Image (cartoon, rainbow, N blue to C red):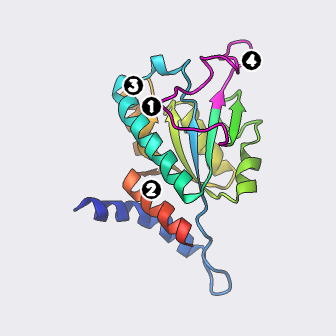
Amino acid sequence: MNRRSFALVLVLPLLASCLLAATPEQPAPKVKPALLVIDTQNAFLPYMSEEDKDRAFEVINAAIALFRDAGFPVVRVYHSEPGRGPEPGTEAFVFPKTIAVKDSDPKVVKHYGDAFNKTDLDRILKESGSNTLFLTGLSAVGCVFATYHGAENHDYDAFMVKDSLISHDAALTRSVHEMTQTISFSALRLVVRMAKAQ
């Protein structure tokens, strides 16, 4: 099976869910994607698997460029635990310069694993019209995983972007991909292009 065929196999479930939701009176809902870049902060990166990091940064940046070029939201999510940090405004708090986010990208600061818990994330996404979320960042087994389930609890379709997740153990990162809806970058590119064309 070639790469394009494989990508289509990954995209079909997403398209099928939209089509199944349609009725003769009600057209299929449009996919309105948003990208979440979660907790790729200087404070946490030293504890993450080197095996994950290089490839993840490449895929995260490619996804950021893809969403930005299509005019879809790129949301920056930061973690800061009161009394323990990292403190906003410090070098430990920010993303490394190698992650291509911009100050103009919507920003969420969370104090819990789930980025929806007591933050403005749901409001930001609803204001942008987003209904389908693509998650990247760290930790795959912690905050990204919690936010994935938080997205489902807030009625968003949620997908992990393959090779864009980081955790302290690359084997655990692979396990997260197996336990969740995961989409390859090739398939993500097709979804974003189709969403832009709607």
Q: Which residue is mark 3?
A: 169
- The answer for how far apart the CA atoms under marks 1 and 2 are is 18 Å
Q: Which is closer to the viewer, label 3 or label 4?
A: 4
The residue at 54%/20% (across/down) is 42
Q: Work out whether residue 113 can be spotted.
A: no
Lower position in the chain sequence, tag 3 or tag 4: 4
The kind of residue tagged 1 is Ile
Magenta residues, start to end: 78-105
- The answer for how far apart the CA atoms under marks 1 and 4 are is 24 Å
Q: Is disc 4 surrounded by few (<14), some (14 to 19) or many (20+) residues within 10 Å?
A: few
- Secondary structure, mark 2, is helix
- Secondary structure, mark 3, is loop
**What is the number of the mark on residue 134?**
none
Q: Which residue is mark 4?
A: 82
Q: Is disc 2 surrounded by few (<14), some (14 to 19) or many (20+) residues within 10 Å?
A: many
Rendered position, 99 above or below 33: above
Q: Residue furthest left?
A: 1
Rendered position, 23 above or below 41: below
The kind of residue tagged 4 is Pro
The magenta stretch spans residue 103: yes
Lower position in the chain sequence, tag 4 or tag 2: 4
Percent x, y for residue 91? 61, 17
Q: Quadrant of the C terminus?
A: bottom right
- The answer for how far apart the CA atoms under marks 3 and 4 are is 26 Å
The residue at 63%/80% (across/down) is 27
Q: Which residue is mark 1?
A: 166
- Contact? badges 1 and 2 (CB < 8 Å): no
- Majority secondary structure of the magenta segment? loop
Q: Which residue is mark 2?
A: 188
